[in-house]
Image (spheres, rainbow, N blue to C red):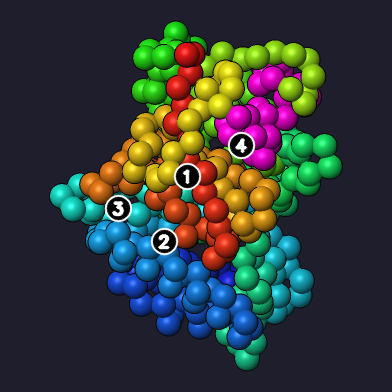
Amino acid sequence: MRAYGEWRAFLKSYIEQVNRAMVTGKLDELTRAFWDAEDRRQEAVRWQREFAQLKSRRAVPLTAKISARPLQTQERGPNQVDVVLKLYQQLHYRHGDQPLQQQVSLTKKVSLQRINGKWGFQKQWEPSNLSPRGTAAHDGGQTGQIAYTEGFALQSGKEEQHTEHVQPAIPVVKGQGGGYDRLRAVLYADTHWDNPNPAYPYLEVDCTNFISQCLYAGGIPMIGTGNKSSGWWFRGWHENWSYSWAVANSLHRLLASGKAPMHAVRKSSPEELELGDVICYDFDGDGHWQHNTIVTGKDSNGMPLVNAHTTNSSKRYWEYKDSTAYTDNIKYDFFHIRGTV
């Protein structure tokens, strides 16, 4: 029981350090928590990239709150424990005269080890394999990614709960301005960014399934063919949907074609996008598109803020330099959704 209390105290202290670092930009306390030198280096690079993104935007962090709740623990003796944590992160910052809030919700697995009476991270944090409802989304032989599960948010400070409410499905309304009601799509994205709609399965890799729901809520009509390799459609649970509905690379292919039902137009820069438009991400730059987001806001420079699933995100800066999936080879594709033409 003593070890149980010690590692929980270590995690709470680390989360408090993260909250401070998000505002001050001081990383030393964070990287010292990792035993392995390469893990310390990689963590430092990731944090430096995140702070550099804020600095380049001239964003001023005001307050940060990162809370974590152990969902599952496995003690491997008195000096080692694996913990699945539900993390909920909020960052309040100022951009110009504009107050903004970014939120991220995800589940990760951490391995802790006690050496010479001191607890630390045995290795970098990993996505959890605790399964959410639903299955992986894949296109033919394409592999799915490890799931980030839903749950809620060991607390830093008072014990507060990040509660998820089940909302009814937002009814589809007829689109405006070319068959696409952008505000309706954004309302859906803001309602369900961390509160999956029970009318749909929540997949292990849910980013594209979520974007398709947003587009549909905005009035983009389905094209139902019954063939998973064609059209854009959803007919219920048990993988009864087209690849383009739930697989990032397949939706990108449909958007890039400019064909129905989105009639998307590729834009050359993120500033050209409007609310309800879509950004696609090829993290490795190898031509295989792995992620999609929807524009739900703009900062004072007119740059997109996006919502997404898998790592559930609200009003996150579009570049994703704070993502563990980010590489220097990343490619983006920007799509303006026209709807019916």
Q: Say which quarter of the image contains residue 284.
A: bottom right
Mark 4 and mark 3 lie on one chain; the one further toward the N terminus is 3
Report x, y in % for residue 296. Answer: 38, 35
Seen at 51% across and 27% down, the residue is 264
The percent coordinates of residue 248 (x first, y second) are 64, 39
Image x and y of residue 286, in percent? 67, 55
Circle 2: element type: loop
Residue 214: x and y in percent read: 51, 26
User: What residue sits right under mark 4 in the picture?
Assistant: 252
Sequence order check: which comes first, mark 3 or mark 1? 3
Q: Nearer the viewer, mark 2 or mark 4?
A: 4
User: What amino acid does circle 3 point to?
Assistant: His
Of the numbered discs 2 and 1, the one sitting upstream in the chain is: 2
Of all residues shown, which one is farthest toward the top?
174
Direction from residue 212 to residue 170 in the image, left or right = left
Q: Residues within 10 Å of mark 2 (few under 14, many from 20)?
A: some
Comparing labels 1 and 4, the label whose residue is closer to the camera: 4
Dot 3 falls on a residue whose secondary structure is: strand
Q: Give residue 92's mark.
A: 3
Q: Give 16 or 37, whichever is nearer the viewer.
A: 37
- Type of the residue with mark 1: Ser
Give above or below for 168 relative to 72: above
- Judge whether 41 appears above or below 298 on screen: below
The residue to which callout 1 is attached is 313
Depth check: 184 or 248 in front?
A: 248
